[in-house]
Amino acid sequence: MNDLNSILIEGRLTADPTTSYTSKGTALCTFSIAINRFYRQDQEIKEETSFLDIEAWGRLAENCGEYLHIGRGVRIVGRLRQDRWDSAGQIRSKIVAVAEHVEFKPETKPAHAKPEAARV
């Protein structure tokens, strides 16, 4: 029986995504998101930012590679995976989120952007 391994997380891309293909032709899209958390401490608002690497596979990966870009907000449903490797006798590890569903948040125009000209 599997243990529960499920995440729901929102953040913004820290860089444009990278899409590649395996030798069997399966798409893999990787990107990183920043997750901001605000909290109150001693009457002051504090901010904590965490960074998480994301992997998407198959058709989801192709869509992410096409529509995502730096700064775009996303909501991700998926699972965590721990990669482990030996580096010069030391065991290293990294946590990666494997996306099973990615919701692309609406893009917003900067407040200083000029409105588009009306079409005639």
Image (tube, rainbow, N blue to C red):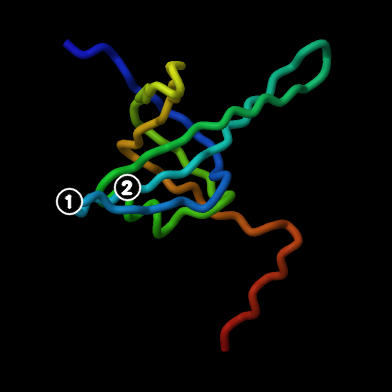
Vertically, is 96 above or below 107?
above
Q: Nearer the viewer, residue 101 or 33?
A: 33
Q: Name the residue rendered at 40%, 31% in the picture.
A: 97
Q: Residues within 10 Å of mark 2 (few under 14, many from 20)?
A: many
Vertically, is 90 above or below 67?
above
Q: Name the residue rendered at 34%, 53% in the picture.
A: 20
In the image, residue 6 lies at what x, y percent?
A: 34, 22
Residue topped by disc 2: 28
In the image, residue 47 lies at what x, y percent?
A: 71, 26
Which amino acid, by three-letter code, is at mark 2?
Answer: Leu
Residue topped by disc 1: 24
Which amino acid, by three-letter code, is at mark 1?
Answer: Lys
Q: Name the residue rendered at 37%, 25% in the picture.
A: 83
Question: The C terminus appears in which quarter of the rendering?
Answer: bottom right
Q: Is residue 83 left or right of residue 42?
A: left
Q: Residues within 10 Å of mark 1 (few under 14, many from 20)?
A: few
